Image: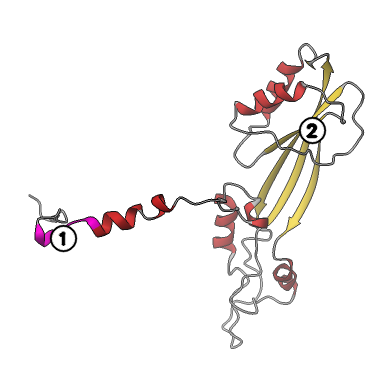
Amino acid sequence: MYARFTPLLLLAPALLLSGCGSQNGGLESVHQPVVQRNDYVLDLQAAGSGLAAGEAERLAGWLASMELRYGDRIAVDDGAGGSTARDEVAAQANRYGLILSEQAPVTVGQIAPGTVRVVLTRMTASVPDCPNYSGDYAPNYSQSTSPNFGCAINSNLAAMIANPADLVRGAPGAPTADPLSATKSIRALRSARPTGNGGTAVKSESTGAN
């Protein structure tokens, strides 16, 4: 098993500004999230119509040790051999709520005959050089912010986002929409009787001790 590391820089022009001085040149922070991609692979022996004896248990142990989470992608590369071991790998991935990707990313090294390669792709997000307390914090008259400006909010964004890949391309919206669901709340508001006409009144609360 080995891993391939691929850094993906977001908002590269803003990151390049970090070397222009100790102050941010404006209200746009130079500290932006950086998404890193790692590909982990595991080669399994195939036999006949699926995995060889004991390989399914080895796959289960490997997936458990990787602590799969939302945003991870799993793919199977059988070297175009048409192995049916994909179904066994899919069953293991389904235990973690993951669906196999249609295409496997390119990995280092050739796949030996009779071998199936399982590829786990994981992305993480972080903000380098944060916090940044260097530079001059004296008042300036160029309308520049401090070197640490943006570290907190962007670091929190990188830590809380469920799928770091969304920072690169964003999450696609649903291809279709249900107008009935979209207008349900509007209909409820318009059809409700006013409180002065016997409708449900807002519950009153008291701050007293009683």
Q: How dense is the environment of label 1, judged by Cα within 10 Å: few (below 14), some, or many (20 and up)? A: few
Q: Is residue 183 shown in magenta?
A: no
Total labels drawn: 2
Q: Nearer the viewer, residue 160 or 202?
A: 202
Image position, residue 11 (x, y; %)? 70, 65
Q: Specify the amino acid type for callout 1.
A: Pro
Numbered tag placed on residue 204 in the rendering: none
In what element is the residue under mark 1?
loop
Query: Which residue corresponds to the image point at 66% horizontal and 24% vertical from the top-left?
Result: 92
Image position, residue 60 (x, y; %)? 68, 21
Q: CA distance from mark 2 to mark 1?
A: 62 Å
Using residue 154 as the reference point, say whether residue 107 is left or right of it: right
Coloration of the structure image:
secondary structure
Query: Which residue corresponds to the image point at 83% horizontal and 18% vertical from the top-left?
Result: 46
> In the image, which residues are magenta?
191-197
Q: Is residue 144 above or below residue 149?
A: below
Q: Is residue 77 above or below residue 169?
A: above
Image position, residue 19 (x, y; %)? 75, 72
Q: Which residue is mark 2?
A: 41
In what element is the residue under mark 2?
strand
Q: Nearer the viewer, residue 54 or 202?
A: 202
Q: Which residue is mark 1?
A: 194
